[in-house]
């Protein structure tokens, strides 16, 4: 028998503040939990997976109850949820490119460990400029050996790069940013302006049909959230700058979406984005906390452009504290907050040991989807929009507050885990995992396969 204590605790902590009092997670509101096994980790990752996906499913059921006067039963499969947190795609006859640049990785400094994130060319260039060495793992390793980890972290971040020194959980809790996180809610929620709530195209079997989602996110939490919304019929339009690439992740996360390109440094293309926003129901973005403000798109401006907008925002390290505008990714946050060090001790390893999957990204993505859905419910009930902000580091804080149980490990992958039909992605055929949750009467499926970035015009259908 699987211990569901952590799962239940996560579900209770994950209730978005926009939820009505009658929709509190309690008793019969808990999604049924099926499947067996857990990912091996220092923290309860499988419980985080099932609870975050369950939270998104609960939010969808609340929205469906408002729209169609009937609340569907829901269940989450702990095995499939764990697998979705790794990858949902199994290519047939082709291979995904590597996700990581050779410079990206963990390195031993003179007094500890540091992780560099160099997948983006400008982040790699910033790190190499500080280190003064060629772009090879061995050269970077030799250069870092003479640095103090904290000093190198500060230097790379100051140069516009991405790095994180490994800290213990206790050290993070003493750090000013760790202290700031302890006072932050999981969901920062604020009501927005009044606006239309429409969506006449929706029907119980396709509850998000007619909803337009403007997706300004990249690796990985934001794309996970919008992929979930697309799975129930939302029209998702992803916008990337023309110079952006992430070849290892795009087939995984563009399922069901149209992908366009705009360079927001050009005034005409910024205006195009504003016109798209004016027709959107939901905006999801993962820029640093001050990025949209710098181009005149602060939260109030976004509500003026589209009154009633459901606005969902993501950052890495939190919305308060000295690091609230710091660049960050899942792997860096795991180093900063103590997860990688705790994993090293838990498994008796000699180097940083992060979670077996990008659980902070994945879980936060499903919580962003829940925030978007609860925002739709609020707009349906009250006729006004909302702005909800989440962060990877706050999700990490939630995860680290729970202890892992003694569940058996996940059984090896089997053919039953995958859909029989092939998805004809733009790169070749592939199988997808079966959906990790079941919402009665509303099957999760996508209207078209994964597509390349820039493959669609910057316009709504």
Image: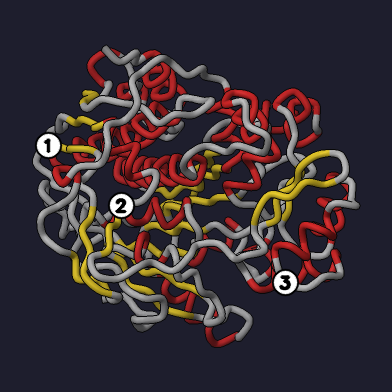
Kindly identify which residue carries mark 3.
135
Q: Secondary structure at mark 3?
A: loop
**Residue 185, position in %: x, y?**
58, 31
In percent of the image, x 42 and y 18: which residue is there? Answer: 6
Q: Secondary structure at mark 1?
A: loop
Q: Earlier in the sequence, mark 1 or mark 3?
A: 3
**Residue 318, position in %: x, y?**
65, 42
Which one is in front in this view, the residue at disc 1 or the one at disc 3? 3
In percent of the image, x 83 and y 55: which residue is there? Answer: 144
Determine the image quadrant of residue 214: bottom left
Near mark 2 (Cα within 10 A), the count class, few <14, some 14-19 or many ≥20, is: many
Tally the numbered discs: 3
State which quarter of the image contains the N terminus: top left
Q: Is residue 417 left or right of residue 456?
A: left
Residue closest to the eye, 16 or 52: 52
**Numbered label attached to residue 440:** 1
Q: Is residue 301 left or right of residue 372?
A: right
Which one is in front in this view, the residue at disc 3 or the one at disc 2? 3
* Residues at marks 2 and 1, CA–CA distance in whole angstroms: 22 Å
Which one is in front in this view, the residue at disc 2 or the one at disc 1? 2
* Residues at marks 3 and 2, CA–CA distance in whole angstroms: 31 Å
Kindly identify which residue carries mark 2.
88
**Residue 306, position in %: x, y?**
44, 63
């Amino acid at each position: 028998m699987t211990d569901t204590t952590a799962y239940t605790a996560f579900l209770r902590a994950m209730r978005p503040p926009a939820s009505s009092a009658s929709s509190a997670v309690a008793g019969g509101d808990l999604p049924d939990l099926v499947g067996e096994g857990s990912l091996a980790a220092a923290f309860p990752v499988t419980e985080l997976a099932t609870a975050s996906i369950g939270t998104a499913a609960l939010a969808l059921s609340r929205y469906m109850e408002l729209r169609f006067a009937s609340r569907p039963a829901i269940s989450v499969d702990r095995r499939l949820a764990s697998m979705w947190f790794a990858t949902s795609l199994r290519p047939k006859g082709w291979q995904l490119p590597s996700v990581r640049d050779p410079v990206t990785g963990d390195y031993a400094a003179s007094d500890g460990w540091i992780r560099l994130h160099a997948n983006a060319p400008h982040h790699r260039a910033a790190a190499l400029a500080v280190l003064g060495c060629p772009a090879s793992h061995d050269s970077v390793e030799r250069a870092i050996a003479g640095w103090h980890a904290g000093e190198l972290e500060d230097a790379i971040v100051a140069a516009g790069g991405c790095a994180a020194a490994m800290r213990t959980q206790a050290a993070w809790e003493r750090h000013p940013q760790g202290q700031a996180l302890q006072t932050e809610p999981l969901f920062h929620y604020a009501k927005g302006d009044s606006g239309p709530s429409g969506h006449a195209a929706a029907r119980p079997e396709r509850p998000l049909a007619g909803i337009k989602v403007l997706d300004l996110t990249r690796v990985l939490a934001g794309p996970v959230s919008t992929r979930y919304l697309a799975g129930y019929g939302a029209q998702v339009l992803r916008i990337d700058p023309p110079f952006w690439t992430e070849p290892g992740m795009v087939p995984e996360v563009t399922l069901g979406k149209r992908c366009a390109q705009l360079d927001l440094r050009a005034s005409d293309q910024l205006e195009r984005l504003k016109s798209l926003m004016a027709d959107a129901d939901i905006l999801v973005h993962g820029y640093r906390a001050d990025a949209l403000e710098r181009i005149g798109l602060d939260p109030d401006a976004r509500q003026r452009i589209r009154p009633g907008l459901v606005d969902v925002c993501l950052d890495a390290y939190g919305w308060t504290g000295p690091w609230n505008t710091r660049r960050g990714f899942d792997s860096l946050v795991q180093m900063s907050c103590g997860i990688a060090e705790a994993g090293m001790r838990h498994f008796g390893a000699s180097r940083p040991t992060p979670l077996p999957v990008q659980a902070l990204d994945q879980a936060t993505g499903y919580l962003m989807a829940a925030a978007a859905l609860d925002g739709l419910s609020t707009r349906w009930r009250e006729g006004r929009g909302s702005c909800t902000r989440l962060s990877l580091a706050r999700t990490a804080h939630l995860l680290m507050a729970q202890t892992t149980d003694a569940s058996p490990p996940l059984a090896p992958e089997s053919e039953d885990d995958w859909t029989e039909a092939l998805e004809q992605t733009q790169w070749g055929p592939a199988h997808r995992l079966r959906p990790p949750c079941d919402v009665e009467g509303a099957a999760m499926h996508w209207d078209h396969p994964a597509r390349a970035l820039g493959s669609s015009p910057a316009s709504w259908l």
